């Protein structure tokens, strides 16, 4: 995935979020379910570290909480697996 593609994804996600804080960077405080599909196949190669860092930075832009933004993570390579489900217990 190119840097342009990653920026387009980020801008698209923040455009969907109408509840942004004034923090720097802004944090989305709108209720939503966010599903991430992560390619772990060998074709990703050395870009996996960049992809992992992008996902980490992306998640810092949302208020991750069972009552706000719930995150699901599906990874695929030779097999598909649900890494993180949206079914989170309230704490």
Image (cartoon, rainbow, N blue to C red):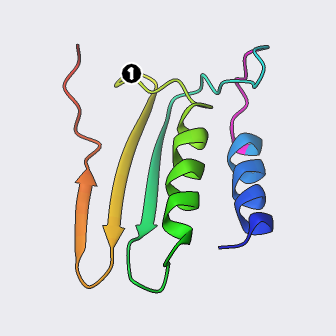
For the residue pair 13 and 54, the one nearer the viewer reads as 54
Is residue 47 placed above or below 61 in the rendered structure?
below
The residue positioned 40% from the left and 84% from the top of the image is 42
Q: Quadrant of residue 9?
A: bottom right
Left or right position of 84 against 37: left
Give the position of the C terminus as an image quadrant: top left
Q: Position of residue 27 (x, y in %)?
A: 66, 24
Task: Tell me which residue sits at (78%, 20%) in the image.
Answer: 24
Task: Give the side of residue 58 with respect to residue 40, left or right.
Answer: right
Q: Is residue 76 left or right of residue 10?
A: left
Task: Report the front residue among 60 and 69.
Answer: 60
| Position in image of residue 29 (x %, y %) | 60, 22
Residue 26: horizontal and vertical position, in percent? 74, 24
Residue 60 lies left or right of residue 19; in this view the side is left
Q: Does residue 20 show up magenta in the picture?
A: yes
Pick the quarter of the image with the N terminus.
bottom right
**Based on the displayed image, in which of its 4 quarters is residue 58 positioned?**
top right
Question: Residue at image x 76%, y 64%?
Answer: 3
Instruction: Give coordinates of residue 72: x percent, y percent.
Output: 36, 49
The quarter of the displayed image where residue 61 is located? top right
Q: Which residue is mark 1?
A: 67
Look at the numbered disc 1 and give the secondary structure of its residue: loop
Q: Count the numbered circles shown.
A: 1
Magenta residues span 16-21
User: At x 80% / y 66%, what residue is drawn?
Assistant: 4
Residue farthest to the left, as pictured: 89
**Is 52 or 76 nearer to us in this picture?**
52
Main secondary structure type of the part rendered in magenta: loop
Instruction: Rate crowding at label 1 as few (under 14), some (14 to 19) or many (20 or more) other CA atoms within 10 Å.
Output: few
Q: Residue furthest front?
A: 46
């Amino acid at each position: 995935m190119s840097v342009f593609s990653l920026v387009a994804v980020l801008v698209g996600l923040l455009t969907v979020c109408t509840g942004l804080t004034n923090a720097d960077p802004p944090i989305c405080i709108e209720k939503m379910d966010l599903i991430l599909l992560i390619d772990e196949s060998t074709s990703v190669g050395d870009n996996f570290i960049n992809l992992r860092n992008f996902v980490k930075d992306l998640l810092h832009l949302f208020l991750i909480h069972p009552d706000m933004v719930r995150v699901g993570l599906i990874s695929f390579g030779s097999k598909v697996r649900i890494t993180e489900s949206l079914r989170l217990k309230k704490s």
